[in-house]
């Protein structure tokens, strides 16, 4: 199998594993967060406005469709359905890593379909930081052009690369590549983790390099260590993946660290409800990203996906009502009780 087809095949493997196997691990920390109830909310729940803005773009709600898939013919229909729901509700959306299509242009359709189905949606292209370092700004430009994106997400996934049989183990020069991109690129640059979280120290480096926003990608949801362990299927790498299942910064802890640095934040990693989105926004996020909770209904049908988004929005609206928040930005004024291990970790990092 050539390197090009290996990348595409890996995308299909990931999609099937995510849909068929238990691939979540850890605790994102949202169970330790309780928003303070407002017994006199003084607002009309039916008049609550979910609309918000991110990087200058108006959005229908703080729900962000986090990067999932693309790069294999079997992923096209999933991306088509995700794009349709993004267009219907005016949600921001990220696509999966575009490396496969950059290596083999005939795979571009699995990504380009997103813009075809969502002509007005805020879209984020997606490129790995190692590919950025190795191929330069040209690949970032091609990724954006492929889907006519408003921004590009540069993903960092050192844990996954460490365990993946085809992984890139050399991360030298990545920060300089990011700095050059932020300096020269015409679109906003978002730096995103993929499940291990971002610390305050790393956030300062990212912001110092010129990134417009950070997607924290915390520990406690989909585990790429677990996915790669399942792909390894009994090899030595499977044992390695098992050893690192608990590695990473829980999402809530990462969010509390990154907010101290300032700048727009997307909270991803273990968000499973509209209540989790409300908690994330109250703790400093601009958007709450979800992948797995939307991937499974997207694999089922368009109707199932629409129903899932409606349920998330209902939960978010009720949480806003019970905190007296007429708009998502009002959630920032809501107090939150944080208990348990999550509180202990936050206090240690202060």
Image (cartoon, grey):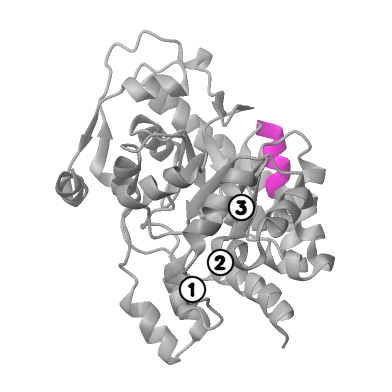
Looking at the image, tell me whether mark 1 or mark 3 is earlier in sequence order.
1
Instruction: Check the image and report above or below for 72 versus 314.
Output: below
Q: Position of residue 8 (x, y in %)?
A: 70, 73
Q: Which residues are magenta?
A: 82-89
Q: Which residue is mark 3?
A: 297
Would you identify the image quadrant in which residue 13 lies?
bottom right
**Residue sitting farthest toward the top:** 42
Relative to 229, does residue 156 appear above or below in the rendering? above
Mark 3 or 2: the one toward you: 2
Quick one: SS at disc 3?
Answer: helix
Image spot of residue 309 (x, y percent): 58, 39
Which of marks 2 and 1 precedes in the sequence? 2
Badge 1 is on which residue?
161
> Which quarter of the picture shows residue 263?
top left
Q: Position of residue 54 (x, y in %)?
A: 55, 31
Can you identify the residue that label 2 sits on?
A: 130
Note whether 235 is above or below 169 in the view shown.
below
Quadrant of the frame with the C terminus: top left
Q: Nearer the viewer, mark 1 or mark 2?
A: 2
Q: Residue at x 72, y 54 (%)?
A: 143
| Quadrant of the rendering where the N terminus is positioned | bottom right
Q: Relative to 239, does residue 213 appear above or below in the rendering?
A: above
Residue 36 coordinates in the image, percent (x, y) = 25, 26
User: Separation of disc 3 and disc 2 at Cα?
Assistant: 32 Å
Around disc 1, counting alpha carbons within 10 Å, would you say few (fewer than 14), some (14 to 19), or many (20 or more)?
Answer: some
Q: Residue at x 79, y 66 (%)?
A: 107
Tell whether 253 sits left or right of 102. left
Q: Residue 327 vs residue 253: left or right?
A: right
Looking at the picture, tell me which residue is in the foreground, 118 or 130.
130
């Amino acid at each position: 199998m050539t390197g090009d087809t290996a990348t595409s095949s890996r995308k299909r493997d990931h999609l099937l594993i995510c849909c068929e196997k238990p691939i979540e691990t850890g605790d994102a920390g949202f169970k330790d967060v309780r928003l303070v109830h407002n017994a006199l909310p003084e607002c009309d729940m039916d008049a609550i406005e979910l609309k918000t803005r991110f990087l200058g773009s108006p959005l229908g709600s703080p729900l962000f469709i986090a990067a999932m898939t693309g790069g294999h013919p079997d992923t096209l229909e999933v991306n088509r359905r995700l794009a349709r729901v993004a267009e219907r509700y005016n949600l921001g959306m990220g696509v999966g890593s575009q490396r496969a299509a950059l290596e083999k242009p005939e795979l571009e359709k699995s990504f380009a379909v997103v813009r075809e189905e969502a002509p007005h949606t805020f879209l984020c292209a997606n490129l790995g930081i190692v590919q950025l370092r190795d191929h330069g700004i040209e690949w970032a430009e091609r990724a954006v052009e492929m889907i006519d994106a408003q921004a590009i997400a540069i993903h960092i996934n050192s844990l996954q690369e460490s365990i993946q049989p085809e992984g890139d183990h050399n991360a030298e020069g990545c920060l300089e590549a990011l700095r050059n991109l932020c300096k020269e690129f015409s679109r906003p640059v978002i730096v995103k983790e993929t499940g291990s979280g971002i610390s305050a120290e790393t956030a300062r480096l990212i912001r110092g390099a010129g990134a417009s926003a950070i997607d924290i990608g915390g520990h406690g949801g989909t585990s790429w260590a677990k996915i790669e362990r399942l792909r390894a299927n009994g090899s030595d790498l499977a044992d390695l993946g098992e050893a690192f299942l608990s590695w990473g910064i829980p999402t809530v802890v990462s969010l509390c660290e990154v907010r101290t640095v300032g700048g727009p934040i997307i909270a991803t990693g273990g968000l499973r409800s509209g209540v989790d989105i409300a908690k994330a926004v109250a703790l400093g996020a601009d958007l709450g990203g979800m992948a797995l909770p939307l991937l499974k209904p997207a694999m089922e049908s368009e109707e199932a996906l629409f129903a899932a988004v409606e349920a998330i929005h209902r939960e978010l609206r009720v949480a806003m009502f019970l905190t007296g928040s007429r708009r998502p930005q009002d959630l920032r004024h809501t107090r939150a009780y944080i208990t348990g291990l999550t509180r202990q970790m936050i206090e240690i990092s202060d």
